[in-house]
Amino acid sequence: MPRTQAGVAIYRIHGPVLFGSADKLDVVREELDGLPPVVIVRLRNMTAIDGTGLHALENLADLLHSSGREIILCGMREQPARLMDRAEFHRNVGEENIVGSVDEAVARAAVLLKGCCS
């Protein structure tokens, strides 16, 4: 179960998200119907990502967007950040929705909630 606050669910990804382990993101998909308007994915403990993992993250972002939700990514380590930058991943989630810390993600979520739910 993710840590939550009003209108926000926070998930943590631990370890690498590579070919063979990209199913780590399935927990978010499985809970889609009960998710609030904003989903924060903490990547501080995601040690590495490859093309398969990046594709899985893209699919998750697309799924959340198609369900009317926003996704915010926070706390990426160097290797995942470099790969996502090269792949222009910000086009999938919006550059403003990729932040450095969970505190920044929560602040960004507040902005998004104010815009969608006020």
Image (cartoon, rainbow, N blue to C red):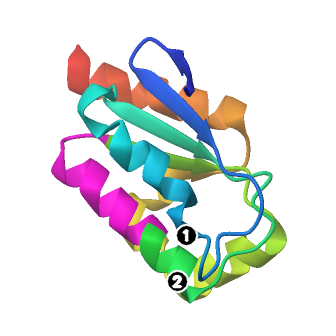
Q: Secondary structure at mark 1?
A: helix
- Dots 1, 2 in contact, CB < 8 A: yes
Per the image, the residue denoted by label 1 is 22
* 29 on left or right of 67: right
In the image, 31 versus 59, the foreground residue is 31
In the rendered image, residue 67, in percent from the top left (x then y), is placed at 18, 44
Which callout, 1 or 2, points at the residue further toward the start of the chain? Answer: 1
In the rendered image, residue 45, in percent from the top left (x then y), is placed at 80, 53
Q: Residue at x 23, y 18 (%)?
A: 117
Badge 2: how crowded within 10 Å, few (<14), some, or many (20+)?
A: some
Amino acid marked by disc 1 = Ala
Badge 1: how crowded within 10 Å, few (<14), some, or many (20+)?
A: some
Residue 76 within the segment the image draws in magenta: no
* 66 on left or right of 92: left
- For the stretch drawn in magenta, the main secondary structure is helix
Per the image, the residue denoted by label 2 is 52
Question: How many numbered callouts?
Answer: 2
Query: Which quarter shows the N terminus?
Result: top right
In the rendered image, residue 31, in percent from the top left (x then y), is placed at 36, 36
Query: Which quarter shows the C terminus?
Result: top left
Amino acid marked by disc 2 = Thr
Q: Residue at x 26, y 56 (%)?
A: 63
Q: CA distance from mark 1 to mark 2?
A: 7 Å
Q: Residue at x 51, y 63 (%)?
A: 23
In the rendered image, the vertical position of residue 34 relative to residue 14, given as above or below:
above
| Magenta stretch in the rendered image | 57-69
Q: Residue at x 30, y 39 (%)?
A: 32
